[in-house]
């Protein structure tokens, strides 16, 4: 008499176990299978191509009904098991069947997680779990199509959500993906790969909203839209909820077997009841649950061996990898790529091909990998990771892939030498290796610039300049002297000037984009490049770039100056150095109220309040704001002050109204960010009491107008300004000052004061663009004003109201 | 003693928050990959508040003089020497727990 095996669940894990049992011993069991779905067993992970129309359901069936019959398996489809009686060893189904078992296998899989928001139960809200869900989506797409379009919102930007979104897009719907986290597929991808994926999906017409929290689903009977936190409303004829899965454990729990997050099993997939086994997504094994197919198959194999008499087998958990199944988007990740103590990152980026690869090593073994754009070598990395292969010997080239690392060309120069003459080096201009090599040899070229000029290789985006230099080195041998361009920092080979130029030329508008396109060697930059990139992006795209607070140094991040004891100092703005009794009274009140230990007059004609606790900053600002004062930007790299003398309002020598001129300049320029701090001064006569000749921009009034001078500095290296020109009117002073600030903003390197910048580019360059070319001057001034229009605001006000960065000013926790 | 101190989302990516404890301020950092690290909020150089620095990779740059401190070991990277005192952290389902250091009678810097 054969033992009776009953399988609850006609899915991938349960049936793979049955297949494995049959393979080992076809006569071991009398098998009965219950499936809740009314159909044969199919490959669930291929539902995405069914949705997108790339496959039919018939193509993804794993076992036909004939197969069950041929193998003498009793199959009950569309009949879910509703109860297990572990004492009597029977199961009872929805349709009332009762079947005995000797061994029971629970393979109930998982249920989609439904976020409990209002409207989640509306008609038109679906999950993405089985063929019925796919059919519902296809119907919705079809009826939307007939009524001329239709919109779908997919909640969840993980693997399943994105596959659903692309599938619906392929069916002609307008699709938005709403994802709670900042990065798509954040559990499988790092920020860089997540950014690439989001831009690729947007190129394909998806709308991607990250950091977006669904507040409610709108509609009467049928769904009509999705309401996000902070007011965004998305129209929707269909809502797909793909926020995750949870092991389906109700049945197991009711039968009395031990459950945690999943059905608890030992290494033989045995539950707390020795005759009841569990396999697949419903189990919890050594604290882990799995939602991917490979581990399920590994479990099935072990269980089948155990059930057919192999005592020694044990499932020890799985190393998992993920691949996104969207045609033409290559994404792969495996293992742990978050690092930890003693790990190192190897990063490769090829901007032209849109490739990003990151391999994380620990003790010369692969611990994790993320591949985007080129996942050809995913199997190779995954195998080495699972095997724990020591990769010390191929460490330097591992990131280039198997063909490269495994082959003879372990040295990049040898790899370039090995390329065929037809190999394309410059994708922008279609220049081959042969073109470049013959230009070098026939025309005697010796530098990158010459190759650029003659062949156009690397003349556009510059992405291939490294390859061209390697070709020069290979072709010329020792005769080649590489150009010494000082890179911005250790994260890149590009100089500050190149990065600035490329941000504008390639219209790069976010930091991950710059790091990818320009092939940064670190995942998220360093303390040198991040503030610089943040400034360059803000300067290039004042209305579009989202300022990255985490890339600003502390003073700019919290709009105060950190002091050596960790307290801060606060300087309210005093326009042109002017103040009033009301302002002074308010400042005095703030000093009393917050017991501020020191008040000092600064060199920029205002008051500095020292020793303020960080947590008190918003309250201090609120009081100063209430008295009409705004941030003095006495921190960071913006316009600082405009110092003035008394001018002709009071002084017997004054020739012009220096105070008013200074106030006008300060009102125009305050709140602007510059490569380094920027100071101005206006003196009312050549006695120059405002010390305008050691400022970044100095104005000295004379009888006939205003003398303008630039590039002064009173710091470590004192430098007197260079005379720029003399103008007649206050309006001209404003125009020249704005134009000069803008050309400095656009051309100087981050952390380069005007003094060294003027010396580097030469006064003639500045005169040519600001003085002699009126059209250019006006254009610069307009760009300055446009940037001010977008960005000039009091950073204290929104923080004082608690509307921004509240986390900066409160501790995470106070433990007494 | 292990204590729940908050969730991952309470800390900005590439940022830090402070836990005030009887033994001194403890900085809790979050990397781009959502790893969480903690150490006493004091640079081994001149005691700068590390929580106020820029987080990059698995390091933080002290806001006072730009010393780079390794978040994993607390050690100073590069040419300088020293070590900040790290504090054990676990993260489970987004909830951060910290092993509260014992109060020491001397100093706050461990």
Image (tube, rainbow, N blue to C red):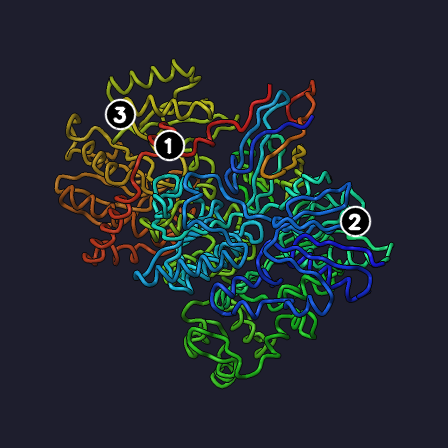
* Mark nearer the N terminus (2 vs 3): 2
Tell which tag, 2 or 3, sits nearer the viewer: 2
Q: In the rendering, which numbered label is found on residue A628? A: 3
Pointer 2 chain: A
Residue B73 point in image, percent of width and height: 68, 40
- Crowding at mark 1 (Cα within 10 Å: few <14, some 14-19, many 20+): few
Closer to the N terminus: mark 2 or mark 1? 2
Q: Residue at x 57, y 49 (%)?
A: A187
Query: Marks 3 and 1, Cα distance to the nearest angstrom?
Result: 19 Å
Rounded to the nearest angstrom, the CA distance separating label 2 from label 3 is 70 Å
User: Which SS class for mark 2?
Assistant: loop
Q: Residue A774: which disc?
A: none
Residue A279 position (above or below residue A601): below
Q: Are marks 2 and 3 on the same chain?
A: yes
Which residue: 25% across, 53% down?
A: A780
Q: Residues within 10 Å of mark 3 (few under 14, many from 20)?
A: few
Q: Nearer the viewer, mark 2 or mark 1?
A: 2
Q: Could you say whether the residue bearing mark 1 is in a helix, strand or loop? A: loop
Q: Secondary structure at mark 3?
A: loop
Q: Is residue A784 left or right of residue A598?
A: left
Q: Is residue A131 above or below residue A721?
A: below
Of the two numbered discs 3 and 1 on the same chain, state the one appearing first in sequence. 3
In the rendered image, which residue does mark 1 sit on?
A: A803
Residue A554: % across, % down? 47, 36
Q: Which residue is mark 2?
A: A267
Q: Nearer the viewer, residue A490 or A765?
A: A490
Identify the image quadrant of the N terminus of chain A: bottom right
Q: Indicate left or right for A610 with A274 as reference.
A: left
| Quarter in which the C terminus of chain A is drawn | top right
In front of the other: A229 or A532: A229
- Toward which corner of the image does residue A24 lie, by quadrant? bottom right
Q: Residue at x 20, y 44 (%)?
A: A734
């Amino acid at each position: 008499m054969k033992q009776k095996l009953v399988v609850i669940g006609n899915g991938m894990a349960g049936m793979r176990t049955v297949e494995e049992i049959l393979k080992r011993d076809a006569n071991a069991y009398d098998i009965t299978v219950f499936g809740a779905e009314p159909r044969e067993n199919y490959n669930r992970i291929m539902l995405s191509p069914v949705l997108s129309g790339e496959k039919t359901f018939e193509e993804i069936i794993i076992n036909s009904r004939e197969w069950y019959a041929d193998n003498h398996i009793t199959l009950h489809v569309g009949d879910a098991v509703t109860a297990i009686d572990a004492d009597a060893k029977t199961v009872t189904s929805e349709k009332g069947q009762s079947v005995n078992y000797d061994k029971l296998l629970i393979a109930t899989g998982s249920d989609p997680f439904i976020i409990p928001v209002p409207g989640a139960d509306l008609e038109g809200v679906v999950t993405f779990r089985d063929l019925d869900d796919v059919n519902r989506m296809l119907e919705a797409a079809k009826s939307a199509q007939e009524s001329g379009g239709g919109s779908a919102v997919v909640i969840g930007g993980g693997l399943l959500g994105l596959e659903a979104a692309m599938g619906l897009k392929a069916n002609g719907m307008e699709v938005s993906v709403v994802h709670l986290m900042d990065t798509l597929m954040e559990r499988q991808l790092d920020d860089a790969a997540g950014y690439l994926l989001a831009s690729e999906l947007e190129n394909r017409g998806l709308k991607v909203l990250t950091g977006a929290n669904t507040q409610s689903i709108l509609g009467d009977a049928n769904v009509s839209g999705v309401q996000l936190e902070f007011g965004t409303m998305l129209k929707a004829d269909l809502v797909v909820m793909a926020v995750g899965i949870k092991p389906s454990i109700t049945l197991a729990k009711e039968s009395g077997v031990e459950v945690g997050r999943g059905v608890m099993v030992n290494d033989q997939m045995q539950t707390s009841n020795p005759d009841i086994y569990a396999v697949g997504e419903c189990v919890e094994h050594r604290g882990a649950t799995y939602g991917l197919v490979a581990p399920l198959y590994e479990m099935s194999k072990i269980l089948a061996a155990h059930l057919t008499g192999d005592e020694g087998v044990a499932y020890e958990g799985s190393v998992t990898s993920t691949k996104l199944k969207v045609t033409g988007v290559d994404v792969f990740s495996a293992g742990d790529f978050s690092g930890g103590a003693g790990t190192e990152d190897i990063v490769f980026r090829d901007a032209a091909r849109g490739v990003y690869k990151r391999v994380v090593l620990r003790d010369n073994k692969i611990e994790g990998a993320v591949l985007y754009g080129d996942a050809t070598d995913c199997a190779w990395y995954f195998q080495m990771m699972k095997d724990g292969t020591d990769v010390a010997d191929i460490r330097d080239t591992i990131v280039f892939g198997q063909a490269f690392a495994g082959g003879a060309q372990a040295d990049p120069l040898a790899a370039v030498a090995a390329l065929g003459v037809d190999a394309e080096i410059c994708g922008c201009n279609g220049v081959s290796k042969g073109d470049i090599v013959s230009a070098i040899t026939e025309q005697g070229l010796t530098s990158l610039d010459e190759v650029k000029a003659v062949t156009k290789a690397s003349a556009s985006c510059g992405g291939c300049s490294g390859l061209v230099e390697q070709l020069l080195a290979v072709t010329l041998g020792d005769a080649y002297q590489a150009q010494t361009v000082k890179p911005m920092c250790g994260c890149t080979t590009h100089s500050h000037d190149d990065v600035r130029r490329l941000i504008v030329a390639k219209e790069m508008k976010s930091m991950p984009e710059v790091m990818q396109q320009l092939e940064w060697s670190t995942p998220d930059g360093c303390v040198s490049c991040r503030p610089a990139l943040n400034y360059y992006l803000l300067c290039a795209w004042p209305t579009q770039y989202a300022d990255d607070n985490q890339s600003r140094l502390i003073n700019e991040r919290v709009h105060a100056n950190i002091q050596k004891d960790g307290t801060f100092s606060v300087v309210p703005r005093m326009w042109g150095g002017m103040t009033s009794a009301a302002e002074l009274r308010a400042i005095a009140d703030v000093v009393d109220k917050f017991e501020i230990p020191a008040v000092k007059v600064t060199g920029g004609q205002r008051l500095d309040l020292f020793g303020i606790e960080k947590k008190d900053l918003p309250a201090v600002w609120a009081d100063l704001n209430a008295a009409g004062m705004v941030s003095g930007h006495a921190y960071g790299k913006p316009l600082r002050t405009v110092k003035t003398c008394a001018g002709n309002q009071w002084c017997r020598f004054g020739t012009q109204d220096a105070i008013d001129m200074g106030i006008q300049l300060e009102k125009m320029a305050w709140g602007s960010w510059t490569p380094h701090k920027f100071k101005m001064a206006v003196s009312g006569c050549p006695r120059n009491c405002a010390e305008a000749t050691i400022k970044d921009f100095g104005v000295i009034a004379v009888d006939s107008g205003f003398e303008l001078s630039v590039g002064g500095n009173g710091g470590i290296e004192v430098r007197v300004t260079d005379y720029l020109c003399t103008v007649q009117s206050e309006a001209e002073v404003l125009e020249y000052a704005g134009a000069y600030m803008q050309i400095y903003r656009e051309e100087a390197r981050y952390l380069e004061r005007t003094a060294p910048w003027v010396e580097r580019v030469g006064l003639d360059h500045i005169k040519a663009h600001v003085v002699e070319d009126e059209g250019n001057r006006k254009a610069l001034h307009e760009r300055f004003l446009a940037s001010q229009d977008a960005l000039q605001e009091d950073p204290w006000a929104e923080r004082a109201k608690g509307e921004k960065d509240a986390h900066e000013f409160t501790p995470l926790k106070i433990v007494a | 003693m292990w204590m729940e101190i908050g969730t991952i989302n309470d800390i900005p990516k590439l940022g830090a928050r402070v836990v005030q404890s009887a033994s001194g301020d403890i900085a809790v950092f979050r990397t781009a990959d959502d790893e969480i690290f903690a150490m006493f909020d004091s640079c081994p150089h001149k005691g700068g508040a590390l929580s106020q620095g820029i987080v990059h990779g698995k390091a933080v740059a002290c806001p006072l003089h730009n010393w780079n401190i390794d978040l994993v070991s607390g050690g100073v990277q590069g040419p300088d020497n020293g070590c900040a005192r790290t504090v054990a952290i676990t993260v489970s389902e987004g909830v951060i727990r910290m092993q509260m250091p014992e109060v020491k009678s001397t100093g706050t810097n461990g």
